[in-house]
Image (tube, helix red, strand yellow):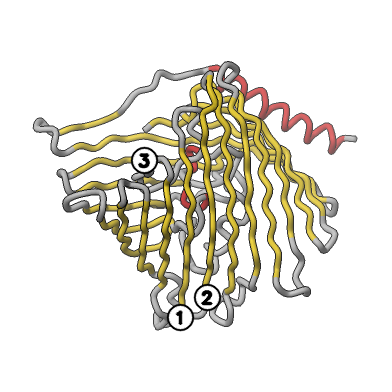
């Protein structure tokens, strides 16, 4: 009984703190420095995601934590009409265990010579293996990314899904077709003799392109977006092929629904044995009620291994978000069940508070 009361008390404390902080709605402001001629500029921002987490496996002790899931400083701007830049730091999971890493997560310089049809990105690039894995964490509809969206990241020796390299990117056919072609470090091996990593992507945008470095999630009824994408990622004999779709649709009165789905086949082969062949699925859906600023959502992910000796894993999440200041300030509560073929069953409750300005 004492353990149960303790975890209920810890979660109630997180809820009370989130409600208190959520009631404070700071004015939206832009912190920007600009040259006199307006040709050069830099602006600054931050992202803070506080999380209350309760994890209850059917074996072992339950876990209770209050921590910063993400704590980031952002900056971006332009040098002139052809050169722009973006960088951000992160201290992920600060306060959870001994995690206190502070590092440069993104540093991207973009060269756009003449038009949106061709540009080059240099630096730490977030891999668009699926739509979800290239989304901005700010605009996520659920309390986090799909559990299968970054299963490749560790084996390829990336930094939170970021890899060093160069990417050609452009928008053609009246902005309906986006292409991304990246040459990246990948897993260098002990003597750096491995071949480089190649990641290519095509995405058809029915209603026009998203031209930023990152894809958006739900726009809370402000935009109509529909896209279909395919990606191919390879290094040595590792390869991932992915198909995805994203639909964000206003339906009147400020209301909207958002749907997203992806299917990936991953095979690390002999090069990355920690990535046995598998088919991964991620599906999420939500409906935004503008008058109440509420967005109930559901997310499902599955990891289906080719080998019968490995245990498949399914995760089902349901939740609701209160977007009191859009993506600039919101609270999300979710419950998830993780079910593995080995009989292990785990319940997860996450409570997120987000504050963002950029």
Q: Mark 1 points at which residue?
A: 190
Q: Distance between the residues labelled 3 and 1?
A: 33 Å
Mark 2 to mark 3 CA distance (whole Å): 33 Å
Q: Of discs 2 and 1, which sits in the foreground?
A: 2
Q: Of 263 and 69, which appears nearest the observer?
A: 263
SS class, disc 3: strand
Counting residues from the start of the chain, the first of labels 2 and 1 encountered is 1
Residue in the image at 42% along x and 66% along y: 199
Q: Mark 3 points at which residue?
A: 74
Crowding near pointer 2: few (<14 within 10 Å), some, many (20+)? many
- Say whether marks 3 and 1 touch (CB < 8 Å): no
Q: Name the residue under label 2.
A: 238
Query: What is the count of numbered marks?
Result: 3
Position of residue 332 measured from the top left corner of the image (x, y, whole percent): 62, 31
Query: Label 3 crowding class (10 Å Cα cut-off): few <14, some 14-19, many 20+?
Result: some
**Cα distance, mark 2 to mark 1?**
17 Å
Which residue is at the front of the view, 291 or 8? 291
Residue at the spot 44% in from the left edge and 46% down from the top edge: 90
Return the residue nearer the eye: 258 or 6: 258
Q: How crowded is mark 1: few (under 14 residues within 10 Å), some or many (20 or more)?
A: few
Residue 236: horizontal and vertical position, in percent? 47, 80
Q: Quadrant of the C terminus?
A: top left
């Amino acid at each position: 009984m004492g353990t149960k009361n303790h975890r209920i008390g810890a979660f109630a404390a997180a809820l009370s703190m989130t409600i208190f902080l959520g009631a404070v709605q700071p004015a939206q402001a832009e912190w920007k420095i600009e040259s006199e001629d307006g040709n050069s500029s830099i602006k600054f921002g931050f992202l803070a995601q506080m999380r209350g987490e309760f994890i209850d496996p059917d074996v072992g002790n339950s876990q209770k934590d209050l921590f910063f899931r993400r704590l980031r400083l952002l900056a971006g701007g332009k040098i002139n009409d052809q050169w722009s830049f973006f960088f951000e730091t992160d201290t992920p999971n600060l306060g959870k265990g001994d995690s206190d890493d502070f590092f440069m997560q993104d540093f991207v310089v973009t060269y756009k010579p003449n038009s949106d049809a061709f540009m080059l990105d240099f630096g730490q690039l977030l891999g668009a293996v699926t739509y979800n894995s290239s989304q901005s964490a700010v605009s996520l509809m659920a309390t986090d990314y799909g559990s299968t969206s970054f299963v490749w990241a560790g084996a390829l020796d990336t930094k939170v899904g970021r890899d060093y390299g160069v990417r050609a990117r452009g928008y053609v056919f009246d902005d309906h077709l986006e292409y991304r072609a990246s040459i990246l470090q990948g897993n260098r091996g002990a003597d750096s003799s491995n071949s480089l990593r190649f990641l290519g992507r095509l995405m058809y945008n029915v209603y026009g392109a998203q031209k930023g470095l990152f894809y958006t999630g739900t726009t809370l009824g402000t935009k109509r977006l529909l896209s279909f994408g395919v990606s191919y990622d390879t290094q040595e004999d590792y390869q991932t092929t992915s198909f995805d779709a994203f639909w964000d649709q206003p339906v009147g009165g400020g209301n909207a629904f958002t749907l997203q789905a992806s299917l990936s086949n991953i095979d690390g082969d002999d090069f990355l044995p920690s990535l046995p062949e598998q088919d991964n699925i991620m599906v999420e859906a939500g409906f935004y009620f503008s008058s109440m600023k509420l967005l109930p959502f559901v997310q499902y992910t599955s990891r289906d291994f080719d080998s019968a000796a490995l245990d498949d894993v399914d995760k089902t999440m349901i939740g609701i978000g209160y977007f009191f200041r859009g993506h600039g300030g919101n609270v999300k509560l979710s419950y998830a069940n993780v079910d593995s073929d080995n009989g292990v069953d785990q319940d997860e409750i996450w409570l997120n508070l987000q504050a963002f300005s950029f």
